[in-house]
Amino acid sequence: MGRWRRPKKSSYRRKDSTTSDSSGLVSSTTGDDDESSDTNLTPKRKNTSQSKQRPGVFSEVDKERLTAYLTAYLHGAERVCFPDDANENSPEHPTNEYDKEWTDDEHVIIAGKHVCPALTNENLALPFLSLPATFTSKQRRSIHELCVDIGLFHCGAGHGDDRRIVMSIHKDGFSHVNDLEDAPVNLIPIRECRPWYYRSDHPPLVGNCGDDSTPAFSPDNTNDTHMFVQDATRRGKETIERLIDQPGLCLRDAHDGIDFEQIINEDLSSVDPPTLGCDDTWMLVDTADKMRQCVQDLRDAQPSEIGFDLEMYQKSKYMQITCLLQLTSDVGKDYVIDVLASGVWDCVPLLSPLFADASICKIGHAIGGMDIPSLHRDFGIFVVNAFDTYEAAKILRLKRHGLASVCKHYGLSNSDEYELLKETYQRTDWRQRPLTERMIQYGRSDVHYLVKLRKLMIRDLTRKKLWDTAGSMQQEEARIVANALTATLRSIKHAEGDAAEGGEEFGDAFDNATAGSSTSNEDGYFTAGSDEDESKPQIQSIYGAKDLRMQSSLMRLITTSQQRCLDLWKGKAENPYKCHALVQIMKRAATTGKIEWTHFHMELYEQLVAWRTSVAQREGVLVDFVCSLDFLVSVANKRPTCIWSLKRIAYFLPGLLEENGTSSFGYADELLSIVQKALTKVTGETVFPQVPSYQDRRIRSNDLSDVNGEPKYPRSTSSFPSENSNSVFVGIAVTLVLTVGTMVVVTAMRGKKK
């Protein structure tokens, strides 16, 4: 008999299968006819006719239509603002049939619902074109990429729900936009906010790792900045790892006790919410002197617990910077530290000894996400002895683990307002200044309740064994002992052969012994005393750190919290060959052929990546704060040779490209020089195109020439007439006039001779 084999799964399925209707109920759709299996089986086929489109992303058809619209705007604006001569196509009509689609109606519909302005002469004559605010963030990013391909100036405008894109062919077109987005160079003072991890002028950090015997780290100890950072990081990790191996050290005998009778019914309703306005309960730290005062106040107060939180700007996991640091303590006030304010950034590392002190418990929520890496990267701060309320919420199995939800679970009186603040400011751009009162209130709320929340969570992590179960066990033990004692004394009292002498004395002793610990029922048997009896054994309610160390749930939380403190900044940069923009442009070049990407572009891109790394090392910043890899891909593809061509890729250049204190456009000059040398090497020459200006357009509408007689054609020499070409036209005209005149004179002389 052969070996049985499991039949292979068939790639066919029955037509009549179990389906689910719109109500979600499962129903059977088996047909009435009992036909053969061949007729009831159909092959599984993927439905390729209708591909699912991701929400908020353009389809290929919509992207092509949008590309045509933007291209029509480019050509139409050039035609209307800079007509070559009066004999060309009249501005009253489109230049070709392709543009008629965008001018026939009052509005143009893109992607089914986005109402864009029609490309009429009136709109084309404006300094810029504004797209509607109905596009999603992903769609706006696609539009920016299309503007780079086409060669339009593009930028964001508006705020919140009015966020939109404006574009122009004019280099000064955006000067007419009232709500243009702020330039990144004005939001982050890059040179004043160099990350500790990358800078070369580290201040000495005394006791950086929580050990008073550890010498101060100073640049004098090593000539290699990288070695200095690695050495400091190694020491910090060793201190944290000691607490992971011995988590009981995180519970201090002098501070970490619990009285269940006192705290069993407490919640966050007893904590007053942070108030708006100026008072003694908080301080805004926005100067170096206030930062030093904040550190001194915390040292003098000698807190046992410090709550902390950070707000930061995170464009990607490779481009992050701390924008706000909030602190609170069990004996002091709240501090909102504006680290981007002048002089504050360099003073924040003064907090390092407090964070490295194991006798002070640092409380945060989800500290392993960005708080721990940012403190390490930006300020060289290592968090020693932490309590993560997020991890505590997970161990307690709360339904929701967000800080606002956890506070609501613990009876926060203004929980609805706090959740509204979370929805409004959790994803806001914290680079914006000045800080509003609501932003400050949000920052304070993220730390204001942490100290009390830690005590309540320790109570809930330990109450089952130390209070709920322990109390019932103590009562049961007392009842058993009382009943056993009563039975023993009763048997002795009623024992046969009791001596007459001393009987009464023994009876009195028996009555005294059983009084208060037992009562007699109707049958004369003694039972354990009632709950109201004064002699009832007292249940223990106060436990110290020694008792808390025996609780497995609490120890597991403390160990996990210390492990989160090891989530330090890794210092890894993005792989330049796995950049999303590079992968996409190479794919488009290989499949569609609509874009060019050759070995020349790749060599230029590699040169630009090496240049970016060099600038970051010179300035002591993250490489992405020089510029992004996506930006370098566009530069290698478009090969701009002047600053305005570069601004067609990003109208607001990264801060270090805009200004470096030595030249008008900072490191942008170095970048353009690399591109120009690469072009010269390949083509033998470098073209510097002129860029149209809206101001020039307005002058040309009144007068074709300026006071110097130079024509107003702010275009590249390949498309618009230049000074040399105009001179040629004038020479040809003069030659024609002289030739015609000569012919007339010769003809007249011949007539006279005849």
Image (cartoon, rainbow, N blue to C red):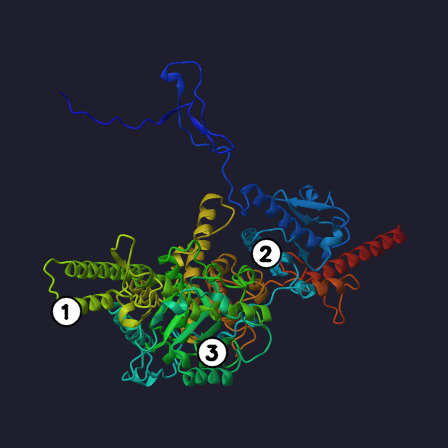
- In the rendered image, residue 494, in percent from the top left (x then y), is placed at 16, 58
Q: Earlier in the sequence, mark 3 or mark 1?
A: 3
Q: Earlier in the sequence, mark 1 or mark 2?
A: 2
**Disc 3 marks which residue?**
345
Q: Cα distance, mark 1 to mark 2?
A: 117 Å
Residue 220: numbered disc = none
Which amino acid type corresponds to the residue marked 1 in the rendered image? Gly
Indicate the quadrant containing the N terminus: top left, top right, bottom left or bottom right. top left
Which amino acid type corresponds to the residue marked 2 in the rendered image? Gly
Q: Nearer the viewer, residue 344 or 413?
A: 413
Q: Is residue 519 visible?
A: yes
Badge 2 local density, few (<14 within 10 Å), some, or many (20+)? Answer: some
- Residue at 88%, 51% (x, y): give it: 751
**Disc 2 marks which residue?**
151
Q: Secondary structure at mark 1?
A: loop
Residue 331, by quadrant, is bottom left
- Residue at 38%, 68% (x, y): give it: 261
Q: Secondary structure at mark 2?
A: loop
- In the rendered image, residue 197, in percent from the top left (x then y), is placed at 38, 73
Query: How many numbered dots are placed on residues in this image?
Result: 3
Which amino acid type corresponds to the residue marked 3 in the rendered image? Trp
Answer left or right for 481 relative to 90. left
Badge 3 local density, few (<14 within 10 Å), some, or many (20+)? Answer: many
Q: Secondary structure at mark 3?
A: helix
